[in-house]
Image (cartoon, rainbow, N blue to C red):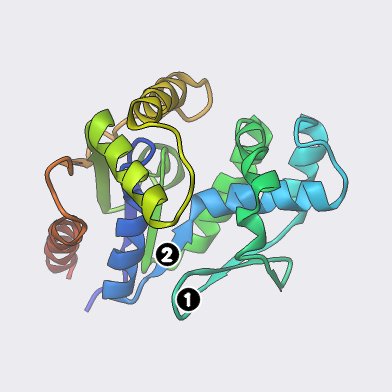
Amino acid sequence: MCKGLQVAIDGPASAGKSTVAKLVAKKFNYVYCDTGAMYRAVTLAALNQGIDPKDDKKVAEIARQIKIDFEPGETEQRVFLDGKEVTHDIRLPKVAANVSAVAAVPAVREEMTKQQRQIAENGGIVMDGRDIGTTVLPQAPVKIFMVASAYERARRRYAENQAKGINTTSLEELQKAIELRDKKDSTRKVSPLTQALDAIKLDTTNMTIDEVVSEISKIIKKTQDELA
């Protein structure tokens, strides 16, 4: 029996990558590495130390100094920053408002990429993001590129916000915001959103979450059989 595989799931904003990645990881008893949470942890560490998130040099120093770990939890993945649990702290509005600036710093991305590779070294991991299959884990045997129409992604996000009781902008405004995010992600200089040449493209516009998880699970099992 082969050891656990590295599974890279990429795609644009609100494509459902994290939801699917968590379910796939649980199904195969793999670790789920939330790369977005790592950038949030760097942001939180900077804010806690009174450092301006827009100070590229100091933020890069923070990224090199801290240690980020993940552990499976009862209902969600637990995130630790230097041994202290920060699962909920990294979701605070002050972090959300500054994480984009931190994630855009090349030296921070370089350090996070290094840490992500270390986490993935032993296999048995599902990692989602924008550049996992192209930059972080280019040798991953399973690469998925999840897409869905901007309208469908906006509709899902809108429904999610409504269910959580979060006041949100109109569906049209959400769609515009998603289209703008797509443009920014695909044209940025450092690790832009692009599909790896050997990634399997999965259009989830008309698929349920269970159907997407099932499809990716088939791909993982097929790859496991081929490598066994």
163 vs 58, nearest the viewer? 163
Q: Report how many numbered discs are placed on residues in the image.
A: 2
Distance (Cα) linking label 2 and label 1: 8 Å
Residue at 33% x, 68% y is 25
As rendered, which of 73 and 191 lies closer to the eye? 73
Q: Secondary structure at mark 2?
A: strand
Query: Can residue 3 be seen at all in this image of the molecule?
Result: no
Q: Which mark is residue 96?
A: none
- Whole-percent x and y of residue 55? 80, 31
Residue 141 vertical position relative to residue 24 in the rendered view, above or below? above
The amino acid type, in three-letter code, at marker 2 is Tyr
Quadrant assignment, res 185: top left
Depth check: give the residue in front, 55 or 8: 55
Determine whether label 2 and label 1 are within 8 Å by CB.
Answer: yes
Q: Nearer the viewer, residue 204 or 83?
A: 204
Residue 198 % position (x, y) = 22, 39
Mark 2 = which residue?
32
Residue 72 numbered mark, or none = 1
